[in-house]
Amino acid sequence: MDDILRELQEIKKILLLGSKEVLNVDDVATLLGVSKDRVYHMVSSRDLPCYKRGNRSVFFKKKEIEEWMLEYKQESNDEIRSKAVSYCFTHPLKDRKLCSSL
């Protein structure tokens, strides 16, 4: 029964995140799936965009955190192949063997 209540509280917390524009450390930890300590570490190392009020109060714009999460896109094989083909057509190469496999 306790497990069900915990799960329901977690679901409620996640649903509430959808309506917030400004987040606290708890919210960001939930959004990222990490501990609060990890969030504080990321703040102190300036990895996460945040706003500070006083010594301990840290706030985040939800939009900025979502943008930060999607900042480093891993390209698919098709995207890489397309860039390689484009590069081969726009840059003359001495060794055409590099582009012949594309």
Image (cartoon, grey):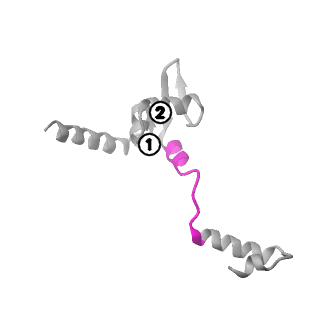
In terms of secondary structure, where does tag 1 sit?
helix
Q: Which residues are magenta?
A: 63-78
Position of the N terminus by quadrant: top left
Along the line of sight, the residue nearer the viewer: 22 or 99: 99
Q: Residues within 10 Å of mark 1 (few under 14, many from 20)?
A: few
Is residue 76 depicted above or below 92 in this figure? above
- Identified by mark 2, the residue type is Arg
Asked if marks 1 and 2 touch (Cβ < 8 Å), the reply is: yes
In the image, farthest residue toward the left: 1
Residue at the image point whose x is 53% and y is 51% from the top: 70
Residue 78 location, quadrant:
bottom right
Tell me: 73 left or right of 85.
left
Which percent across, then down, holds residue 84? 70, 72
Residue at the image point whose x is 40% and y is 40% from the top: 20
Tell me: 8 left or right of 82.
left
Residue 80 location, quadrant:
bottom right
- Identified by mark 1, the residue type is Leu
The stretch drawn in magenta includes residue 20: no
Which percent across, then down, holds residue 38? 47, 33
- Whole-Å distance between the Cαs marked 1 and 2? 10 Å
Q: Residue at label 2?
A: 38
Question: Which of the numbered marks, if any, corresponds to residue 32?
Answer: 1
